[in-house]
Image (tube, rainbow, N blue to C red):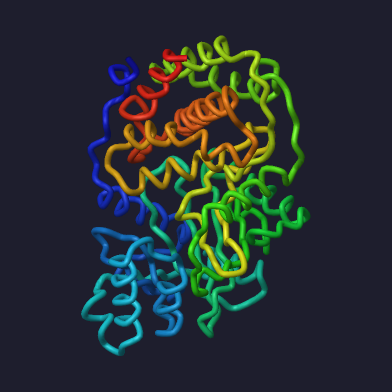
Amino acid sequence: MPVRTAPARLTAGDAALRAQYLQDVLRLLYPEPCTTAANGRAPLVTEYVVVPDARRPRLLVPTRSRRIAAAAVRRYAEPQSRIARLKRDAVVAALRTPGASAVLLRHRVRVRGPIRETIDGYLRTALDTDLSISVHIGPARANRKPVLQLIAPDGQTLGFAKMGTGPLTRRLVRAETTALSALSHVGLRGLTVPRVLHSGEWRGHQVLVQSPLPVWRPRAPLAPDRLGAAMREVARSCGISRSWFATSPYWAELRERLAAVSDRPEGAALGSAARALVDRTSDVDLRYGAWHGDWAPWNMASLADTLLVWDWERFTTGVPLGFDAVHYELQRRIQSTSDAEAAVEATLGVAPALLEPFEVTGDAARLTALLYLVDLAARYLADRQAEAGARLGVLGTWLLPVLVRRVEAL
């Protein structure tokens, strides 16, 4: 069984991994001769407050002004729960109140050095404007990368910058740049995506600056029909094709991805399950279109007049219709439970209903849902999510057992 061949769980906690990543990010954004040493004498480039503290860093907030600091927290991302919103609002209040932040948010990082050597200097030149930067310190993932909020002196958000710093993240940043550029010509009606403001390289790192989406505007309830219509619009955005699964370009491409990870125990188990799946369903007819690739509750916001959708780095064409709907359901369930394996089972149970609006029914619906799991697992293995410490990186503990059981039951 895949569980027995899964790599060992990493034991480092999220806080420890974030603290280490904080130091890595500072070295990336402010390379030598810049320094964060307390006794530095070079000109001050910027000062950050570490939120909530240096042991559990989640956000670096610039202290240039109380207005900028408050905007960095208030407009970075929308909390997913009431408690998270209360915590955010408390931090904003502390940053706005003279003296309060020095007491409640005590950990500071001061960067000194020549500004021309820093990411601040690069972005000010690239966008031809004055700006301050706040830095998100995300959870451990293979595709984790510096994400910067760019803030004008008046507190307005100018945009968000992503930096690809290694082979995987450079590829993803380039892919998102290409996706946003392509989608800008499609004329999407039911959703709004960011615009590319700048694309380039800095010190060998791939940089994408995209326009901000107004996540701070009042929210509207997210009706399932409205979400499904937006997903279908994306699915049709680059055209629709049709073919038997076994002879499709999609299966040919997926087979190559599976071969690339076959040297690992979980990769071998995944490949066996995929081959058994194609043997049992080779004559099933499927339609293929585009998908966002990571359409999840935390990558979107529902407003009265549009859906805001961001993080398009996994956008792909030529995949079975309905992948976005299945992915969203799985991520929604995983977000609300600690039992990821049960979330996979439950998602497969409702997959036929999720796929029916895409006109994917019967054998095609069952095949599409299982192919989605194969596709997602191949991504996790290729990205080496387990080695990066991702919470769900060890596929043998949740996804693979379900996939194997379902394929064997066909």
**Quadrant housing residue 191:** bottom right
List x then y, in percent, for residue 339: 28, 37
> Position of 60 compared to 222: left or right?
left
Relative vertical location of residue 111 with respect to residue 142 in this rendering, above or below: below
**Quadrant housing residue 74:** bottom left
Pick out the residue farthest to the bottom: 98
Identify the residue shown where x is 43% and y is 81%: 64
Identify the residue shown where x is 26% and y is 87%: 99
Relative vertical location of residue 129 with respect to residue 118 in this rendering, above or below: below
List x then y, in percent, for residue 183: 71, 52
For the image, the number of numbered tags is 0
Q: Of residues 402 and 94, which is closer to you in this image? A: 402
Q: Of residues 138 and 369, which is closer to you in this image? A: 369
Observer able to see residue 330: yes
Observer able to see residue 39: no
Relative vertical location of residue 174 with respect to residue 187 in this rendering, above or below: above
List x then y, in percent, for residue 160: 55, 64
Relative vertical location of residue 45 with respect to residue 349 in this rendering, above or below: below
> Position of 345 compared to 363: left or right?
left
Q: Of residues 49 and 407, which is closer to you in this image? A: 407
List x then y, in percent, for residue 184: 73, 57
**Quadrant housing residue 52:** bottom left
